[in-house]
Image: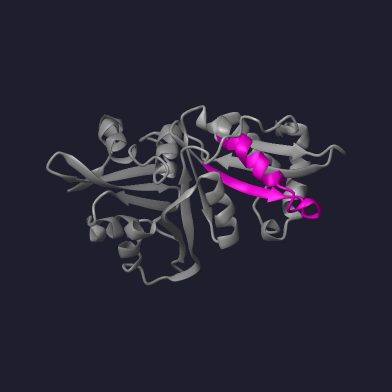
Amino acid sequence: MIRLLTQADHEHVMALVSDKPAENLFIIGDIEAFGYDAEIQQLWGQFEEDTLIAILLRYDRNFIPYSKRDFYDVDGFADIILQHDGDFELSGLLEVVAPLKEKFQFKTYRDSTLYYAKCEKLAYDTKQRDYSNVTTLQPHEYEENIDMLKSIPEFVHGAFSIEVRKREAKNNTGRTYILRNDEDVMVASASTTAENSQSAMIVSVGTNPPYKRKGYATICMEKLCSDMFKTGRTLCLFYDNPEAGRIYKRLGFEDIGYWSMTRYNRG
């Protein structure tokens, strides 16, 4: 049986998703931020008797399914998605999303699969590291940081904006650490997004191009990760570059699967 979930189901929902806080980062974060009654968001659950075995989250036009089991009611979830008009996005763990993708024959204008990794502690001791030049990004530095990130080739088309920085700071859903050199040049930064009580996503790890290969981004990451672990959060990130993956794994990240993102155009 599939039905809409309400606040009364919250304990069952969290029991399903909380043992994998990295894998369910977006679901947990959206529930904490918007609950079960917001217009922009809905959640459905599949029950076997009284046990919740799978959920489907809709945030605006983005749908994320999750199930611990190897099977769930794929047809039922597909029917729910098809009841919503217009373009939509389907994302989630590849093994969960793959059966759903087979139900949609619409044109896609984005279909990507990324490595998904998580970290619960750094792989080495950083107690002797000097982090005096690593600081949290301040509002007067937003524009400088965005300009630096857009100077990095892989980020040139990134959706960075001062408004996003302000919103994440206001809602406590993201933070950015920056590193300045002795000449006061911003040489690297690393950020979180989608922070919730259990996990957070690492994004926008980059180095000012003239200052690459000096370990600056790694220092930012170490400080950011260390501070986040002190709050009890699990960290996760996407990557598609094996070289970047090797850097993250040296820090202590381990692959936990693949994340699929597909945007459908229903014409």
Furthest-left residue in this view: 49
Q: Is residue 10 above or below residue 237?
A: above
* Residue 243 percent location from the top left of the image: 60, 60
Which of these two is toward me, 65 or 254?
254
- Tell me: 169 left or right of 257: right
Identity of the residue drawn at 75% across and 33% down: 133
Q: Is residue 259 visible?
A: yes
- Tell me: 263 left or right of 224: left
The stretch in magenta equals 201-225
Q: Is residue 241 above or below residue 231?
A: below
* Residue 231 percent location from the top left of the image: 50, 27
- Tell me: 252 left or right of 187: left
Colour mapping? one colour
**215 magenta-colored:** yes
* Residue 247 percent location from the top left of the image: 59, 52
Furthest-right residue in this view: 183
Which of these two is toward me, 173 or 120?
120
Q: Is residue 174 visible?
A: no
Which of these two is toward me, 224 or 156?
224
Identity of the residue drawn at 77% across and 36% down: 141
Residue 224 image-quadrant placement = top right
Q: Is residue 228 above or below residue 49?
A: above
Exactly how many numbered labels are in the figure?
A: 0
Residue 51 image-quadrant placement = top left
